[in-house]
Image (spheres, helix red, strand yellow):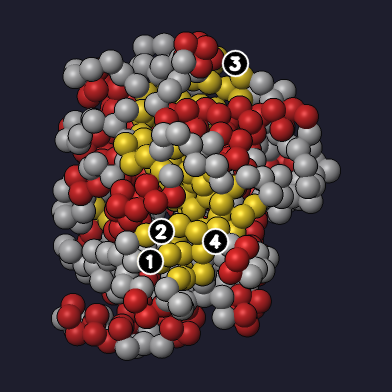
Amino acid sequence: MVMIIMKGTLFMFLAAAAFATVFAASLPDSDDALETANLPFGLIKGNHLGSGVREFLGIPYATVPQRYAEAVDWSEKYENGARRANVYGPICPQPGMSIAVRWQGAYSEDCLLLNVWTPSVVPKKPAPVLVFIHGGAFVEGAGSSFNGSAVSSDNGVVVVTLNYRLANFGFLAFGQRMSNNGLLDQQSALRFVQRHIASFGGDVSRVLLYGESAGAMSAMFHSLMPSSRGLFTSVLAESGFPQTRSLAYAEKASAEFAGLVGCNSTNATKDMLACLRNVPLAKLLKAENAQAGNPFSSPGWSPVADGDVFPQSPSKMLLSGNFDVSLRHWVAGSNTDEGTLFVYPSNLFTLDAAGYRAFVERAVDGHGARPLNATQWKQLYHLYPANETSDNRPTASQLLGDATFICGSRFYLRHITRKIAEERVPSTRMYHFDFLRNRFCSLMPKSLGVLHGSELPYSFNQPRMNDAICNTFSAEGESLALTIGRFWSKLAGDDLDKEDASSWPLWDEDKELNILFNRSGQTEVETKRHATRCDFWESVFEYRQND
């Protein structure tokens, strides 16, 4: 299966807000002006926002470096019986951090923090909860990039964002029970929500887990992982695909990383781990940066099919039906031009036929995946032929978008639908985001189209996301943001009505109906998007199910 890893500038346009937000956090108010929430640990004090929302930032949910990290002991962090939660906490260490972040010291290994936005007026009954996992290829990003205040205010829901360990800190792999720590951090945050979100007015029986890119992959993973059962009630993936690395490949990449920081990869695992734990943070970050480069040839960091967290690879679990189907809603979707972000930045002017073939071979057969056979390569180039005389970037982008987010979402929903149809009425839905923002507001080149991450400003109703220069949306964009926020919140609350069901029909593998958020900011129903090409990629996913 194709492995796409976003590195450096490929993700920076989405991640830049994370670093800016850390420094633009609310200034401390007097204690009397702060909102409060009472947890078993004690009282915490957050902000009151003019939109009618209470905001609690930088709440510790777990300790590190435990494998199954649990709620932290706050006893030493209280002053006068209370803890301030009115500014964002540090982001997790990651490659590519700006000089400003390093200078400000706004990062720390003690970064397992979450943020909560909740209505100021406590509802008569507990509110639905939306828990968001950020993207960034499992190497970049922070929960502080995503402000949930507008969604909370617009829809009367509780919104949670979180940090989790990244890159080598979260995804080194040394055998069973020694991998996937970043995923297990996310799981610990979900446990914190189950135990404590009632203190913020949230309903633990109505929790939507969602995310974008690596965060969407994470949401898909948790929907399949046995150890995450019961921690949320619905799942939504914004541009994800259910793929892990094999344990053998991940261990090889981890040993190579250990060698970069002077830990002998020929030593026993326990000796290598002991060595790594004593390597200074700055040296670890330098080694991560040394590995950055072409996203299809560098080892990257991501979850692993380790036989523990994942008894089998996600693809094999889906194909075999080896997963629980008790969730109420299963939703996945993607944008029109998912692949452009991974092609155009590394091919600024053009991509000739020879370069296209080399690019595709690196992308499709990289990261230890089982190589395609001759018949499959023939099929691939029939669907995505090289242009011998013109620019191949559009075709390369189409291939990458299909091979990951677009057809990966279809593959996920197809096998979820098959399993749940055996037991109850299906509740799977798909979306396609095709709204193109006014180019006077976006700094992204027009050639990138409705690229990966384009939906984020609208799903959070935050116009300044993605390095946008406009403080507001157009009338069409504002309407779209309210529509998406309403749908996402209703999925969390399990209260979609007949009108919603008409606008957004259930997905099944016969009709393949999905909702389209179109260029006018309106919705329509679309059918069988990229069905023929996705049939090909599904055959590849099945062929590589053990990777």
| Labels 1 and 3: the sequence-earlier one | 1
| Labels 3 and 4: the sequence-earlier one | 4
Answer whether labels 2 and 1 touch (C-beta < 8 Å).
yes
Residue 488, image x, y percentages? 50, 32
Q: CA distance from mark 3 to mark 2?
A: 44 Å
| Labels 3 and 2: the sequence-earlier one | 2
Residue 343, image x, y percentages? 59, 48
SS category of the residue bearing label 4: strand
Residue found at x 66% / y 76%: 100
Residue 358, image x, y percentages? 51, 51
Q: Nearer the viewer, mark 3 or mark 2?
A: 2
Name above or below for residue 472 compared with residue 35. above
- Disc 3 residue type? Glu
Q: CA distance from mark 3 to mark 4?
A: 40 Å
Please give the residue where the numbered disc 2 appears in the rendered image.
38
Please give the residue where the numbered disc 1 appears in the rendered image.
42
- Disc 4 residue type? Gly
Residue 274, image x, y percentages? 24, 85
Name above or below for residue 148 compared with residue 281. above
Please give the residue where the numbered disc 3 appears in the rendered image.
524
SS category of the residue bearing label 1: strand
